[in-house]
Image: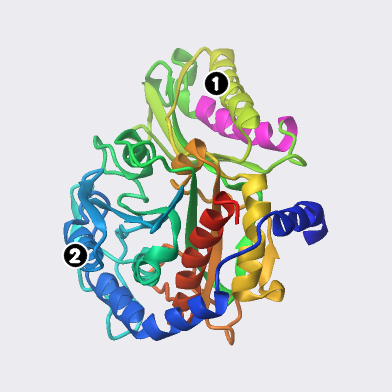
Amino acid sequence: MRSLLTPLFILAAAAVIAQTDYAATARAATDLDDKVVEWRRHVHQYPELSNRETETGKYIADHLEQLGLEVHRNVAHTGVVGVLRGGQAGGVVALRADIDALPVTERADIPFASKATGEYRGEEVGVMHACGHDTHVAMLMGAAEVLVNQKEDIPGTVVFLFQPAEEGAPEGEEGGAELMVKEGVLSDYGVEAAFGIHINSQTPVGHVNYKPGGAMAASNSFSIVVKGKQAHGSAPWAGVDPITAAAQIITGLQMIVARQTELTKEPAIISVGKIQGGVRNNIIPEEVTMIGTIRTLDEDMKAEIFDRIRQTATNIAASSGAEAIVTINDGYPVTYNDPEMTARMLPTVVSTVGEDNVHLVRPITGAEDFSFFAKEVPSLFLFLGGMDPAMDPKEAPGHHTPDFVIDERGLKYGVQLYTNLALDYLHGQNGK
């Protein structure tokens, strides 16, 4: 499948004569590896939930200040921005790592396992870095140190974005990349491009996956309230049954994907995750509520699916005398890898980990709020291997699970990728 990008790949490689010493970056990352692992283990052992990453943010900011960077604390509540201004004039690039953990109780048998607890939706829960954000933090802290050591040779500015609340802000709060953008982390520093990395527990260490265009899905939650007329269960004809209408709506929603959506263009998903209505076995209730998620990878398809959901729910409800009220919430946009930026930076990825270890993959229906940065500036989001190569990917614990583990031998590749992407982009912008 790589042949699809070959012409762009060749043009990009020819247009930019890389000034980055990849071997030197690799040596620097190896020299820092023990420190990066230590940082990762500290953050893993002391996780904090979204918009509550106070100590995590302080840990990061203290490190960046020790490096001599311009540091801004409490960005988007608990985030941190570090600014490295190189010794030469040039462009501005952002590197992003997310810093929040999940309401998951850790089950992995590791010496630095989390024992932390927190409050989530009014309940006390275990807290765990079950998605690898701790590794992202450590890798970007490492890249900052590598880049500082060659500050005078950098043609431009590197902005380090340590972003809170990637997993979503608590109800009633703003947060995450959307709030960082709103507060000006891109516009204030004149950021021209952004790069992000996500560790993957089911991809072998040393491998990198990428996807031009829509790489991860837009995510939108929805609710449908079906209003009927209450009646005794022995006489359903005396009322309007919202439960049967809701059941037909659920089937109708699946027909949108199965029969009305051009799935050869991009995949799409509509899933109902909860349905609630009624209090007693012999009472037909007045109202039923269902909630779910929509995943799309194309903006036009997303708009069409939204329209079809509203039309399907309201018409099916009306056909039985009920009423359907559909609410589709704002969520995460498509995580979009700019095709030209992808082609331009692909030689950097290949030079970092080797051509045999770089893989063009299908899109992922999970969502990422790096997408808010990618909406504003040309961006590239990569997936880095974090699985022991001896493991079977089918047996490796998945993300957001209590048994989630990462092989720390992969962290040095993340440090190299962050560093090399920033340097090659800035050297390219400087016309070298």
How would you classify the magenta stretch by its main secondary structure?
helix
Q: Up-down: is 429 above or below 186? A: below
Q: Which residue is mark 2?
A: 62
Q: Residues within 10 Å of mark 2 (few under 14, many from 20)?
A: few
Question: Which quadrant is home to the C terminus?
Answer: bottom right
Three-letter code, disc 2: Asp
Using residue 354 as the reference point, say whether residue 412 is left or right of it. Answer: left
Q: Tell me residue 148's x, y (percent).
A: 35, 67
Q: Up-down: is 125 above or below 270? A: below
- Residue 273 appears in view: no
Question: Which quadrant is home to the N terminus?
Answer: bottom right
Q: Residue at x 41, y 62 (%)?
A: 400
| Nearer-the-camera pick, 302 or 292 | 302
Three-letter code, disc 1: Arg
Using residue 43 as the reference point, say whether residue 393 is left or right of it. Answer: right
Query: What's drawn in magenta, residue-wise?
Result: 244-260
Q: In this rendering, which labeled residue sits more in front, label 2 or label 1?
A: 2
Q: Which residue is mark 1?
A: 310
Quadrant in the picture for residue 97: bottom left
Task: Give the CA distance from mark 2 to mark 1.
Answer: 49 Å
Q: Residue at x 42, y 72 (%)?
A: 404
